[in-house]
């Protein structure tokens, strides 16, 4: 596999980053994951915009002109012959050559820019989307700026492991009694025909797939309510699902051992997945 590192296309074994890189020592980096379907980037403009926002919020330097980033994405997809899969981009504050809590001088420390692809045939035609997945609820103990897409992913990783241990597939995080989001996705329920998902704030990541799916839902005359919901509401919902760039729209059929909507995949989630894939490809 060919990867990209700071201006060069290299084999994955050749690409090397300093041990002083701030992402390695401090999780001082941001990232984006864009899906690839039929060799094309999905929702790329949205991902680039969010990247810019993450960089601004953390006072991080742009690693390259944004036009160049599109070019790099396209070239890497082509070099690796990706038809269906993902492309991962990470920008870090660079490697100042020592460990220090204070940010290094951006004049002397260049950001580290890394991109790689992941081949995932069957991403669109995913059999799991026909079955749905099971989630557990866990406390949301992450930091308070979840709207910034940083590489601090230890707690989401732990959440996935807690889910696995409980015989489930993923975890939805709960703060002050309300679901914030999934470990790596935005969470939704459907009740009496209404799609309910948490409103945007610093409590959750502003999902690019979320924005697209809500737009398509509204265009299809579906009712959307952007507000927090509880685990009890999820248990009592007609349907549940989540969205992310890597899973699109994924039905959720169980939470904390309670079947949602009789335990089978719902119509709204199925329809939204179809619309999203049709409109995005
Ligand atoms: N995760 N919430 C969190 C905490 C996420 O990590 C993600 C994405 C989302 C969905 O955002 P989007 O629709 O823009 O992918 C919501 C990516 C896919 C990941 O970490 O792999």
Image (cartoon, rainbow, N blue to C red):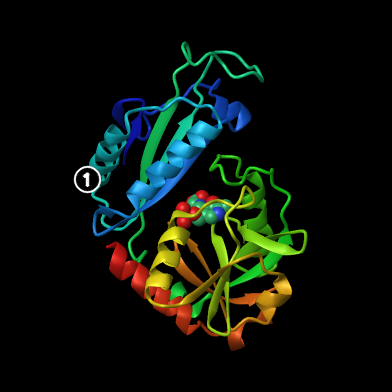
Position above or below: 168 against 266: above
Position above or below: 281 against 158: below
* Left or right side of 39 for 195: right
Residue behind mark 1: 78
Residue beneath the point at 62% across and 65% down: 227
Position above or below: 96 against 218: above
Which quarter of the figure has residue 163?
Answer: bottom right
Residue at the extreme right of the image, as rendered? 176
Relative depth, front residue between 13 and 249: 249
Position above or below: 248 against 97: below
Q: In the rendering, at what x and y percent does residue 207 appear?
A: 49, 55
Which quarter of the figure has residue 182?
Answer: bottom right
Residue beneath the point at 54% across and 13% down: 97
Q: In which quarter of the image is the C terminus?
A: bottom left
Q: Is residue 127 visible?
A: no
* Left or right side of 1 for 264: right
Relative depth, front residue between 211 and 128: 211
Q: Quadrant of the N terminus?
A: top left
Residue beneath the point at 27% across and 41% down: 76
Q: In the rendering, at what x and y percent does residue 173 appear?
A: 68, 59
Label 1 Cα crowd, 10 Å radius (few <14 / some 14-19 / many 20+)? few
Question: SS of the residue at dot 1?
Answer: helix
């Amino acid at each position: 596999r060919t990867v990209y590192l700071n201006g060069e296309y290299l084999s994955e074994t050749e690409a090397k980053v300093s041990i002083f890189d701030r992402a390695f020592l401090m999780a001082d980096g941001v990232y984006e994951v864009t899906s690839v379907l039929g060799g094309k980037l999905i929702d790329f403009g949205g991902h680039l915009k969010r990247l810019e926002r993450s960089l601004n919020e953390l006072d991080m330097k742009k690693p390259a002109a944004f036009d160049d980033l599109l070019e790099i994405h396209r070239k890497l997809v082509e070099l690796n012959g990706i038809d269906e899969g993902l492309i991962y981009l990470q920008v870090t504050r660079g490697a100042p050559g020592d460990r220090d809590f204070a940010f290094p001088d951006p004049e002397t420390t260049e950001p580290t820019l890394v991109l790689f692809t992941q081949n995932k045939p069957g991403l669109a035609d995913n059999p799991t989307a026909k079955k749905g997945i099971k989630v557990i609820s866990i406390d949301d103990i992450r930091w308070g700026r979840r709207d910034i897409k940083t590489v601090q992913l230890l707690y989401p990783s732990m959440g996935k492991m807690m889910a696995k241990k409980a015989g489930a597939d993923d975890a939805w995080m709960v703060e002050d009694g309300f679901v914030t989001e999934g470990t790596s996705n935005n969470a939704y329920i459907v009740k009496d025909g209404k799609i309910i998902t948490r409103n945007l704030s610093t409590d959750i990541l502003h999902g690019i797939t979320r924005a697209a799916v809500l737009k398509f839902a509204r265009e299809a005359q579906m009712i959307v309510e952007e507000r927090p919901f509880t685990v009890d509401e999820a248990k009592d919902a007609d349907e549940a699902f989540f969205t992310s760039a890597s899973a699109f729209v994924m039905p959720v059929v169980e939470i904390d051992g309670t079947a949602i909507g009789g335990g089978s995949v719902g119509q709204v989630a199925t329809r939204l997945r179809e619309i999203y894939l049709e409109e995005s490809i």
